[in-house]
Image (tube, rainbow, N blue to C red):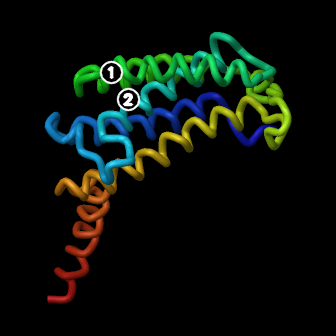
Amino acid sequence: MNYYSSRDLARGFRTVRKNTLAIANEIPDASYNFRATPDTRSIGELLAHIAASARWTHRVQAIDKLTNMTFEDFGRYAQENASYEQSLKTKADIVKALESNADELGRWLETVSDEVLAQMVTFPAPVEPPQKTRFEMLLSGKEHEMHHRAQLMLMQRMIGITPHLTRERQARAAAAARPAEAGAR
């Protein structure tokens, strides 16, 4: 018995992307150029990077189905990704890319067999570990997005927006406290 399924993986990815899209949609267009510091990506650049990363994951895993990643592969995909990221200029472009890339990857994830998830993908020395399962590589894409989403949530606070997940948690806590307060009266 496996501890994963493609449906679980697809659902998890879609949840992560739903939250990223909520942030992308909440941040005003004018704030897409905001940078936490001069040497970091802007909000727009970070969201374009997230969109491109899902596209890269789909390309490597679903289309090209690489089982041996070379440094040349990394370089080629990185160059393609950089060009794609730079082509996403406006909030509308970025949100559309986040939606469409998530749809493509999510649909594919739902169909992946356990055998495909268990396939080993090898890497050249000195990369450690020298191989990973396709499942682990797919999880790393989700982790990558969550890492950048945390950065976006901090940037939201810096521009005066309380992140939606924080607002939802606060609303649940307030709702739970109401019955306790009513009973105390």
Q: Quadrant of the N terminus?
A: top right
The residue located at (27%, 53%) in the rendering is 163
Q: Quadrant of the C terminus?
A: bottom left
Would you identify the image quadrant in which residue 175 lies?
bottom left
User: Measured from the top left, where is residue 44 in percent x and y?
Assistant: 30, 34
At label 2, which amino acid type do we have?
Answer: Ala
- Residues at marks 1 and 2 touching, judged by CB atoms closer than 8 Å: yes
Residue wearing tag 1: 88
Whether residue 9 is situated above or below residue 119 in the rendered picture: below
153 sits to left or right of 124: left
User: Measured from the top left, where is residue 183 in percent x and y?
Assistant: 21, 83
| N-term-proximal mark, 1 vs 2 | 2
Whether residue 26 is situated above or below residue 63 in the rendered picture: below
The residue located at (30%, 41%) in the rendering is 43
- Cα distance, mark 1 to mark 2? 6 Å
The residue located at (52%, 38%) in the rendering is 12
At label 1, which amino acid type do we have?
Answer: Leu
Element type at marker 1?
A: loop
Would you identify the image quadrant in which residue 180 lies?
bottom left
Mark 2 neighbour class, 10 Å CA radius: few under 14, some 14 to 19, many 20 or more:
many
Residue wearing tag 2: 48
Would you identify the image quadrant in which residue 61 lies?
top right
